[in-house]
Image (tube, grey):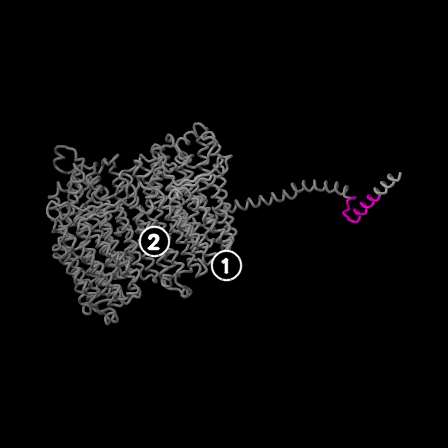
Amino acid sequence: MPTPALLLLIATLLPLLGFVILLFVGKKMGTPLAGWVGTAMIGGSFVCSLLAMISWYTVPDGSAWGFEQGPINLPYHWIPTGDGIQQHKPGFLDIGIFVDSLTIAMFAMITLVATLVHVFSIGYMREDPRYPRFFTYLGLFCFSMLGLVIGGTILQLFIFWELVGLCSYLLIGFWYEKKSASNAAIKAFVVNRVGDFGFLIGFGILFYHLGNVSLPSLWGLLGNAGTLNEGQLPIPGGYITATLLTVIGIGLFFGAVGKSAQFPLHVWLPDAMEGPTPVSALIHAATMVAAGVYLVGRIFPILTPNAKLFIAIIGCITLTMAALIAIAQTDIKKVLAYSTLSQLGYMILAMGIGSWVGGLFHLITHAFFKALLFLGSGSVINAAHHEQELPQYGGLIRKIPVTGITFAIAVLAIAGTPGFSGYYSKDLILANAGAFSTLAEQAGRSNWYWALFAFPAAIAFITPFYMTRCWMLTFWGKPRNQHVYDHAREHPVMYAPLIVLAILSVVGGYALNIRELLVASTIETKKYVEAQHPGVTFRGYETAWPPYDPTVKPKTPEVLEGGAAPPKVETPAAATHHAPDAAGWHLVHTIVFWAFIVGIGVGVIVYWNGYWLAAPLTARGPLAPIRIWLYRRMYFDELYSLVFVSVVMGLSRLSAAFDKYVVDGLVNLAGWTVRRASTLAGLHDKYVVDGAVNGMAELTQNLGAAVRAPQSGRIRLYVTILMAAVALGLAGAIIVALS
Amino acid sequence: MMDFLNHWLLTILIFLPCVGAVLVLLMKDRDSIRWAALGTTIVTFAVSLLLFATFKWGVNGPYDYMQNPVGGQPGVVQMVQEATWIPAFNIKYKVGIDGLSFPLVILSTFICLLSCIASWNIEKMTKGYMALFLFLETGILGVFLSLDFFLFYVFFEVSLLPMYFLIGIWGGPRKEYAAIKFFLYTLVGSIGLLIVLIGTYLYSRSVVPGGTFDLVRLAQPDVQAALFAKAGMSTALAKTFFLLLMLGFLIKVPAVPFHTWLPDAHVEAPTPISMILAAILLKMGGYGIFRIAYPLYPEAARDMWFLVALIGVVSIIYGALCAMSQTDFKKLVAYSSVSHMGFVVLGAAMMTDAAVNGALFMMVAHGITSAMMFFIVGVIYERAHHRELGRFGGIATTMPVYTGFSTVACFANLGLPGLCGFVGEVMVLIGAFQAARPDSILMQATHGRAYPCIITFAVISCFGVILTAGYMLWTIQRVYLGPEKNEHKAFPEVDAREISVLTPLTVMAILLGILPYIFFFTFTDSTVHALFGLFRSGGAAVAGGW
């Protein structure tokens, strides 16, 4: 096994070891030893990931694997599904290890954030009676998350996908005594299952066409789906149509919709904030919710342009909706949750418009600054004795300065301030969105394509605003709850991780080679696929922008003059790369560049001293109902509860009643009928059959009575008669003898 | 030694518990009765493990569905022992094993051992209970191992009787109703079985001299062809026979709408009997489908796929919906059994290798999880003396170890990857999608017209996974989560005996979930392929269908 693969495997298994140890002896270890054991394990994983990264970078040119050389692919046959009867070859559900630069980058990010969250939790959870169990669950989560990232097949992605879902369930419901926590846990799991429902369908269709779901073979067979909007792709033993590929793509994407909490399945994430705050930082901000984006990144080459358009639209809706809701939330964690939703929307949008590098780049930078924001909020909540409402805060910067400053750095990063990490990744996405829309216009498509740039660009102004609002209400102005203010304190175990994350949030954009790693990943994949499938030109990461619409004449002058038919096959991005790309960057530089100043500035003014401006503004007038609508999260929960929950529960009650009264009723009716019939038969038996029998008997009896008379049954009589007979006989004999 | 085992092992296995039952009857002291019963189940389990040494498996192994005499023709059916029983009708005592029966035999001896431990606290007429219990095990093993139709039928009925008494005497308040319902229901199914048994024999007389009840022989392609060509069996009659067989087995499975005996039987049965009922007795139905109904009438099965698949899908969804609104913990688990066994029926109907392999796996996986779930219900019932879901809550604080086991069981039940429930579910679902391939048996038999139906069924059954997650998690919430309740404070944590039942089940649930290939498919794969050889070669594809 190549060194990096081995190291990453060890990195994956170490948290599992920690989980097993803590499961059996965690309670004996107690506080804080159990926490340190868990931390040591994930820390070991981080070291292994770093070593793997070094070994990855230092391979010589021409190796089979390594940075810009190629990926490591080690499949393992897990379940046979059809070898032998010519249904599928190779008919195996594989799992396996797949390592490329993306894997390396994800491992480094996950293990680092996880280690910091572990350290933070040692402080944050120190008073919890179930402290060891918390680290047990965290260990299981880290194992599952790393197993997801190292997976080489869609099946393995799905398996670990469910396992991270389980950990999320367990950790959201960690304080299970609270009804709201266990409700939120169930909601998270079931809503994710709805996404998995789509995933399973996509997976099933994909499997029945290919008989194989390992990522490299998918890329090899369907890797050029991005250039295909109609027609079909050849696969072994047949073909697969573009429409079906779109269905597969959207089906698989539905899994990501669930896990990455995209519209319409976003409702579980805000509720998931019921879990302990370090969990929100690790699972519901940095890693697990990003797994959906990671999945889309992995299946990106097999997505058709129509599937990508669908993905982009979902991302666009999510990022807009969530950012608006975030403005009106009063719970600090809810604000961050909606901000996470919005940022995930950006990543999904990036995938949809073909900005593969942009989406994954944002995933990693976002992991740093969002983990920082959540841990910071944890520090605030801890300082404020588990008070989470923004109206109860104010002026905390004087009490918890490290938290305040690191939080501010994260706000600057998410706002897209130049020099901070968010700036690089978000602007890359926006530039690509601009290029996408420019291309759409050039190709003569609907002007609606501009929405895919306009909404994210507009939200780029909103994001700094609501984040500044959150910071100002927490740290600035006069304390609004003197009790909370007086007792606020911060804890070194808790702010050390904040400082590390703050540094990463600043330099993550340019100093850590993240973008280079992602670009290298596309090169490695291309090399590998082309080596595995000779004669194939792999263009999986060069997306077709945007879908071809045959009913619209292109506006380009050549077509108007020459009347040439528009190209049937979509032009890959690379071919027309430079002009739209430049246009996109131009748009970003002119429109979005100052968004951070505008957003932060407005935020600072409006919330300079608590709600001094915001409260009167939203008290009445047109803003009041909007604020309530946003505060109630656009009433999605009420809607779903009405439409889905009550329908399913109603159906279930109906089924149970049907079962009890109709199905079982029929059975009991059958039983009753038979019993009644048997009673009838009994009566018939008694009066008719038995009557006949009795009649016979009576006849016999009468006959018998006649015959019976002499047979009185009296022994004395019998004996007397016998004696008389004997006497008579003897007498006769004597008479005969004498005569 | 090997030769002796090859000939006698199965017979010994079948009658060992019976000998144990006689031993138990001879004893007086309650404790020695228990230990004798436990010893018998342990020995039986140990003997069944010897099968690992004698059973030949492997993906590259024999592929034909026929008997594998030592040193003779290759075939998947092994370790056959036969003796003439009733020569006038060519009825034989014939036992043998292949990939279909192998996992179920191991499962049976395993679960019987565990439920014997679970029976430790039966105080009422222990002797009778244990004797019937061991007698039941003989019946179960006989069903899974007999290869003669008549013998199968005898064991099928024999297993019914002890169950009737075990529910009817040691059951809950409505035990008589439940026992009679169980008995009569299954008996109705048996009548169908009996008709086909006699009918098939009569037709087989013009194919095989003197007729035969040999299940392997009857499934051979030449016999199959001769049944139609020479013996003059009509397609309509074959369909009728298939339906009658399926009626018998679907009642046993149980599939909607023949399922209402199950919740009643479970609610009334004592815990260990519920474990056996759910884990093994239901599998006799599934086993019958794969051993008798499909191999004997493959064409009818192909024609009737829609009906069977519909029953399967309805069972999955309807069972899950009914489970969701139950308030009795045990009834909920019973309905969840209906839902899960629906996957077995669907897997059979789809007639693809992944689906059939998945259905077989589902049977074993469900055997593990349902036994575990029923035991868990029993544990809490013993402490609380009720099973009302609404009255529980906060058990996680009171009994953390017990909650840990329960969580594993619930998640295995809802199909979490890494635990056994997932593999069966996902393979049946994938197999259902596989059936939409143009080269699948169903697609070829219907000339592609089945496509929309297959896809619809596959998609609807995928929906089942959401419902299952819903009701299982809701159950966890209502029983284990929430603030600790005062009336539960006195509940003792699970004791050593209970842990000794739960641990092996947990280990198996995890092992089967992580390494399904090593622990399962190595044994079944070649047999499933052999069966598919039959399904495919069974005459020309019949046009039309449903």
Give the prevailing secondary structure in the magenta stretch.
Answer: helix
Specify start and end residues of the magenta stretch as a single range: A710-727
Q: Of the numbered discs in the image, which one, if any, rests on residue B29?
A: 1
Q: Position of residue B341 (x, y in %)?
A: 40, 46
Mark 2, residue position: B507
Q: Position of residue A311 (x, y in %)?
A: 23, 46
What amino acid type is highlighted by mark number 2?
Val
Query: Which quarter of the figure has residue B383?
Result: bottom left
Q: Earlier in the sequence, mark 1 or mark 2?
A: 1
Q: Nearer the viewer, residue B43 or B419?
A: B43
Q: Nearer the viewer, residue B203 or A552?
A: B203
How packed is label 2: few (under 14 Cα within 10 Å), some, or many (20 or more)?
Answer: few
Distance between the alpha carbons at the discs numbered 1 and 2? 34 Å
Residue A721 covered by magenta stretch: yes
What amino acid type is highlighted by mark number 1?
Asp
Q: Nearer the viewer, residue B332 or B158?
A: B158
Q: Position of residue B426 (x, y in %)?
A: 32, 45
